[in-house]
Amino acid sequence: MTPTKTPTAPASPFADEIRKTTCYMCACRCGIDVHIKDGRVAYIDGNRDHPVNGGVLCAKGSAGLKSHTAPSRLRAPLRRTGPRGSGEFEEITWEEALSTAADWLRPIRQDAPEKLAFFTGRDQSQSFTGFWAQAYGTPNYAAHGGFCSVNMAAAGIYTMGGAFWEFGQPDWDRTKLLVLFGVAEDHDSNPIKVGLGKLKGRGARVISVNPIRTGYSAIADDWYGITPGTDGLLILSLIHVLLKAGKVDLDYLARWTDAPVLLKEAPGAPDHGLVLRNDEGKALVIDRRTGQPAPFDAAGVRPDMGGRLVKDGTSHRTVFDKLIRRYMDPIYAPEAVSRACGIAPDRIHALAATLADAAFSEPVTIAQPWTDFRGERHEEMTGRPVSMHAMRGISAHANGFQTARALHVLQILLGTVETPGGFRFKPPYPKPFHAHPVPHSACHPGTPLAGPHLGFVRGPDDLALKDDGTAARIDKAFTWDNPMSAHGLMHMVIANAHAGDPYKIDTLFLYMANMAWNSSMNTAGTMQMLTDTDENGDYVIPRIIYSDAYASEMVAYADLILPDTTYLERHDCISLLDRPISEADAAADAIRWPVVEPERPGHEGVRGFQSALLDLGVRLGLPGFVDGDGQALYSDYADYMVRHERRPGIGPLAGWRGEDGSREGRGAPNPDQLQRYIDNGGFWVGHMPDEARFFKPWNRAYQDWAVKMGFYDAPQPYLFSLYCEPLRRFQLAAEGHGERQPPERLRARIKAQLDPLPLWYRAEAEGDTDYPIHALTQRPMAMYHSWGNLNAWLRQIHGANPLYVPLEIMEQHGLKDGDWAHVTSPHGRITVPVVGMAAVNGKTVWTWNAIGKRKGAWALDDGAREATEGFLLNHLIHELLPPKGDGQRWSNSDPVTGQAAWFDLKVRIEKAAVQPESQPAFPPLKRPPGIRP
Amino acid sequence: MTCLPTTTDRKLGLAIDLDTCVGCHACVISCKGWNAGDDGAGLGDADPYGADPLGAFLNRVHTFEVQPEDAPAQIVHFPKSCLHCDDAPCVTVCPTGASLKRTEDGIVLVNEADCIGCGLCAWACPYGAREMDPVAKVMRKCTLCVDRIYNDALPEEDRIPACVRTCPAGARHFGDFADPDSHVSRLTAERGGFALMPEQGTRPVNRYLPPRPRDRAPEVPMLTPVAEEPTGFLAWLDRALEKL
């Protein structure tokens, strides 16, 4: 038979119209083209003009329409009718919902605003939600950074004025060597893939340090399958080898870092180890021209990294002097660290040699003159083409802050930060810690907080402590337990509120945070805390308000639900005031706008959370939300995005400001601003002058441009901090200096671990013998937290999550693929299916994150594999470490930032009988009204 | 039995770079979205929120572990879709003429109007590249986005398969393998692109670019110390700083 005709093309979703907005299927925030047909979303692909993704789009992004139409979408505000945790609700009107919330929150604000704890999860509007919380006056506000990556963010800010992802990126077009540390499918999703493609295209080398060789590590030229929690030790060993060989960028260190800054050496004195400063507060260096001390930024100064000074009987040595004495110590030799890291000494030597070769044998030079902050003109820009990227793999450990610091110190020693071919900041970064606010926590009835909740402490004076020394915040952020908790500790809120420690609260208000499931450690315990009652039969946490777009597990544990829209139905701003999407050469921001209207036929309907929060602010009469007559200042969030000014001329969106839209950065509100964004594809990009593109912290052209754009109000050049002086101030307090003193139980730890030079200590809990195996989770590339399995397409890719077990361990326990195993930690036991794997560190098991679902949630059938086979490792992790016999329960977190140390989990494994479903299993939740699988 | 053309004017197909594919499934879902159509009827999903969701996909990514004798284990992500074979057994086995290979560009298609859903083609394909639509009960397969690549309604730069347009890592390339100067032909020549399972005699058009060698010791000199102790290092430093 011969075919006679060509078939007609398959049904094509050729659009009536393409509407361009911003994706929200993960935190990457790519530009998307939403194809609309007959008023419906027909297809989504990438926006070719967008600075983040340039047209490409990941599986999550393309699957967005299935999340937009998912049956788990909420349809109306809900009021709990059954016991908490049952999932029994009735639909109510928005007026009832908002007046109920206002009636709960009004008296709290008048009496004790701290009794509201307002925490947001995957929030991309923290600038706004924080502004609301500040106006309300509660000190208890943060987003999810405390269990995400605050170690990374804080270490970066304190060391060099920015970290990875939203703060900066590899110089993808010029780098010759990229080293990834602990990066799975992590932020930022598409730019890393695009960048790896570029590197592969020109034969640049990619090295991955990661216990698991999936994803990006799979395509790395070289894989270091490190033992979890030892990255810091490996990095310090690399520093050891590089220093001994003199393979550090001395010119860079002398000019742009605190390496030549003088430190006081007066053991026992209250300023021992602090920076020597002049009367104006400027750090002093020895000028090699004169041999005399001079301010670091004086015109023509040639800082001497080997300088010494005896002044008033006190000797002073440089940071660099201290640094080489620390890291030349043989305890950091590859031969000494090899066993702990699980990497052979010769491979550590080889990695150091590879770094040195890429950095120093082929520098990258751009013929672009520029002038530095000391006034010296440079004819060209020369850099070291080594870049690095790291994420949670090094961050989510109890040594994560110091490990991230160590990594930045390595980058800086090689002269690779803000130089061509290296790592580049993205506006409004770089911004040093001393240009950020300090945290504010003093709270007074009926009164706004005096400043933002979150910030960067300089020393003990900035801690969020009450006069009696107890924590001012419910999460105990910015206390001696974790003084630099710049993102708060969302993971401790429920446990602390349940324990009434440091105090009881009245209302817990959460947004986009699945705390009753995958966003909590100790998941079963968290569910218990949310439902516990006191001796009167009242809930220990009296009221819970929650906003989500979907019927997640957390919905069932709230009393009042404010249903959010999907990301295609809402206004949002991706703001420079918040979590920016800029590129190294340009500032950028973006909007979301309702490309389709939120319709929930037969139900009350949903509202964008930010607009609901604005309404609540008006009902409560919050300053900034109402005028002097109590009238609303903004009609909705879109109106706020356009007309709100944080400082005169500075608003949420930087593009098309000024009454005629001709200004960028600074300018009066422009009533047509959102239309200008829509006309431009949903985003704005403002390029910096060519002269400003590198050496940004020290580059006059960049500093002037940053001021013009409104990132700050005066140029603020600064030196990178190899030495973290704020940490030294906490050590001094622990040594007995100053009025604010740490509790006795913490003195030794602060002295040992809050070291101003990066150090490594074993992160995981004690009990190696009983629990010899590390257990990790990773995000699959096609899934993002719990946002994936409600999606009909994505759940066909990752519908279940076995535990991946090294082949040796499989053999040792007589396990075959598909067998079941008990996995036990000091905190609990799960029973799950296992699959063997070779490309993994031999002491490490792992699984995909948040595939497991509770029956009844997310509008899945009770028989869905996610709810039967799927499981969470969270059940094995506690927010507290096991008792150590010292009478204390230590928090399972980083001692500097409080970051949840969920990658410190250690387990043992035993073969189990075949199970009908993973254990623990929980009773099904009832589905809210209108939700059907 | 359906006949194949003896030759085709062009040989459109994909060059897929296994060195660069990170296994993100972007191509899988972009393909699904485009070919499902605005009403989803183009690629059905049975039981989408149930215990056993089963949807038709024209492109899937498989993941394999490789365990070399002398190197750490490796992972290869392997995207698989129709290879648009010159000797396509899925076409010759078709009893109705619904399966066909186009003379003008070599694309293998299914004329759904004539497909009786017998499934013989899926059995005949050695690559498992065809899937029965669980809802429409007709055979589905990669069309190379024939409704995109010739579509004047799309901007010229978008007249490529959806999977190629979306691939974040740039691991997918589309072009004419009959033209030795095409991008895909040159890539194949430069990178040693190979045909999948040539022993099957299907003469596939698509090519895979192999992973570059991994885990090789870098060809760089090992570092030698300038000093063993801090004091010696400081003396070296002083000399080095003088030279700056």
Image (tube, rainbow, N blue to C red):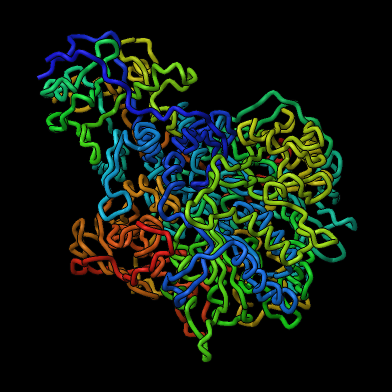
Instruction: Give the residue displayed 46% in from the left and 41% down from the top.
Output: A61
- Locate the C terminus of chain B by quadrant: top right
Q: Which residue is at the front of the view, A828 or A394?
A: A828
Whether residue A320 can be seen here: no
Residue A478: percent from left, percent from top: 67, 69
Q: Which residue lies furthest to the bottom in this view?
A: A535
Residue B22: percent from left, percent from top: 39, 39
Residue A558: percent from left, percent from top: 51, 70
Instruction: Give the residue displayed 69% in from the left and 33% down from the top.
Output: A676
Within the image, what quadrant is residue A145 found in?
bottom right
A879 sits left or right of B203 in the view: right
Q: Which residue lies furthest to the right in this view?
A: A279
Count of numbered labels shown in the rendering:
0
Whether residue A463 can be seen here: yes
A470 sits left or right of A93 in the view: right
Within the image, what quadrant is residue A752 found in?
bottom right
Instruction: Give the residue displayed 48% in from the left and 53% down from the top.
Output: A234
B42 sits left or right of B95 in the view: right
Instruction: Give the residue displayed 20% in from the left and 13% down from the top.
Output: A4
Residue A157: percent from left, percent from top: 66, 53
- Locate the N terminus of chain B by quadrant: top left
Within the image, what quadrant is residue B63 found in?
top left
A95 sits left or right of B149 in the view: right
Q: Which residue is at the front of the view, B167 or A295?
A: B167
Q: Which residue is at the front of the view, B84 or A507?
A: A507
Q: Which residue is at the front of the view, B192 or A88?
A: A88
